[in-house]
């Protein structure tokens, strides 16, 4: 009974995440179908990956016919932040979090789920985390499927405008952080400038590798210029 | 290349990144430089993914630029993620009507 109420509490906390995911993954569904995937394939990607940036870049690797090694590296670099979040979250788990639960719950470590779980005062129980994950993943996969289907039905003027939705979300993540910290602003501007250079001066580098090279270079420059003394933001 | 393989690699790598530190790793990272590097990676990734790809995201430069500028302004005023994302779409859509 106690576990059940924890699950419901988690599910309630997951509703805003699920609603947000629904609208953003709608854009991913449209993007995936536009890149030549079927709605079913887009749905399976969302169900098995549960991540926005990695999926978006993964679809462009698929569309460009990239190699599996490129795909693996792209996912590694784009999603490496989850390793940090997983590490941080692993410090505040309830003792009920046995290894089996850790294997299942690891699936649901995303930026937003991490943010909600780590904002809790008390240790996280498996039931609570499963509640958050269930509602969030439901919104993410449902939105993907609806977007993938609607992408074929919507007038081109609407579906092409929706192609920008994920990028809009990325801007909404980077700009407020860059406004507060000069280091993040510098790193972001360097990454964007390197991105432009790769695209127009070194067009033989594929999109996935270009993102890796630019992001790693900009982050190294950031770590050297602005090493962070404090623990967490 | 088979779609099943692509999806398996995507999902497998993404899951391993999450599960290895969550289930196995117990030591804390001490190096300030590695911690700083990891801290900056998400912002660098998102910036490099967005620029210049966002300018090609709608199939026409004017609509994409209108959407980008709208998103930058809305994000600067700390509006919620969804509002910024949908605002960019709306700006791209409205610009598309007038050109």
Image (cartoon, rainbow, N blue to C red):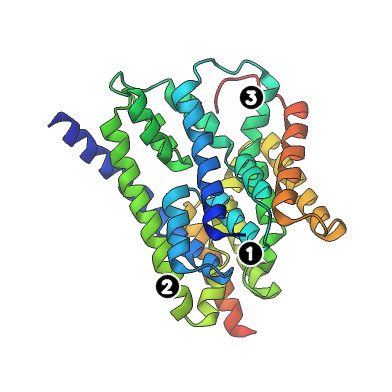
Q: Residue at x 70, y 34 (%)?
A: A183
- Identify the element where label 1 is drawn: helix
Q: Residue at x 42, y 39 (%)?
A: A107
Position above or below: A50 against A231: below
Per the model, the C-alpha gap separating discs 2 and 3 is 42 Å
Position above or below: A172 against B70: above
* Chain hosting mark 3: B
> To which residue does mark 1 refer?
A63
Q: Is residue B51 visible?
A: yes
Look at discs 2 and 1 and give the one toward the viewer: 1
Q: Residue at x 52, y 49 (%)?
A: B8
Q: Residue at x 49, y 39 (%)?
A: B15
Q: Quadrant of the C terminus of chain B?
A: bottom right
Q: Which sits in the foreground, A80 or B4? A: B4
Per the model, the C-alpha gap separating discs 2 and 1 is 18 Å
Residue A228, label in figure: none
Q: Are marks 1 and 3 in contact (CB under 8 Å)?
A: no
- Residue farthest right in this picture: A201
- Where residue A6 sits, quadrant-wise, is top left
> To which residue does mark 3 refer?
B35
- Identify the element where label 3 is drawn: helix
- Identify the element where label 2 is drawn: helix
Residue A164 drawn at (x, y percent)? 58, 65
Q: Are marks 2 and 3 in contact (CB under 8 Å)?
A: no
Badge 2 or badge 1: first in the primary sequence: 1
> To which residue does mark 2 refer?
A149
Q: Is residue B73 visible?
A: no
């Amino acid at each position: 009974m106690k576990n059940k109420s924890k699950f419901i509490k988690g599910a309630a906390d997951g509703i805003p995440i699920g609603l947000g995911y629904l609208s953003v993954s709608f854009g991913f569904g449209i993007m995936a179908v536009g890149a030549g995937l079927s709605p079913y394939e887009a749905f399976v990607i969302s169900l098995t990956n549960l991540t926005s940036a990695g999926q978006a870049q993964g679809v462009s690797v698929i569309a460009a016919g990239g190699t599996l090694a490129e795909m693996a590296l792209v996912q590694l670099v784009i999603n490496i932040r989850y390793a940090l979040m997983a590490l941080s979250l692993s410090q505040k788990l309830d003792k009920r979090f046995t290894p089996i639960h850790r294997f299942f719950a690891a699936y649901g470590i995303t930026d937003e789920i991490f943010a909600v779980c780590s904002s809790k005062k008390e240790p996280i129980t498996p039931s609570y985390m499963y509640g958050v994950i269930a509602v969030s993943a439901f919104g993410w996969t449902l939105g993907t499927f609806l977007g993938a289907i609607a992408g074929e039905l919507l007038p081109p003027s609407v579906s092409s405008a929706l192609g920008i939705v994920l990028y809009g979300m990325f801007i909404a993540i980077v700009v407020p952080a860059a406004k507060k910290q000069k280091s993040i602003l510098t790193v972001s501007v360097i990454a964007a400038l390197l991105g432009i250079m790769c695209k127009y001066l070194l067009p033989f580098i594929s999109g996935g590798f270009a993102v890796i090279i630019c992001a790693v270079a900009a982050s190294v420059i950031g770590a050297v210029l602005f090493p962070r003394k404090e623990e967490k933001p | 290349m088979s779609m099943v393989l692509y999806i398996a690699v995507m999902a497998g790598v993404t899951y391993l990144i999450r599960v290895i530190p969550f289930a196995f790793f117990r030591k804390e990272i001490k190096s300030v430089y590695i911690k700083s590097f990891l801290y900056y990676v998400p912002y660098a990734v998102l910036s490099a993914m967005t620029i210049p790809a966002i300018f090609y995201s709608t199939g026409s430069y004017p609509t994409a630029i209108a959407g980008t500028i709208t998103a930058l302004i809305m994000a600067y005023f700390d509006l919620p993620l969804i509002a910024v994302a949908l605002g960019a779409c709306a700006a791209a859509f409205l610009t598309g009507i007038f050109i």
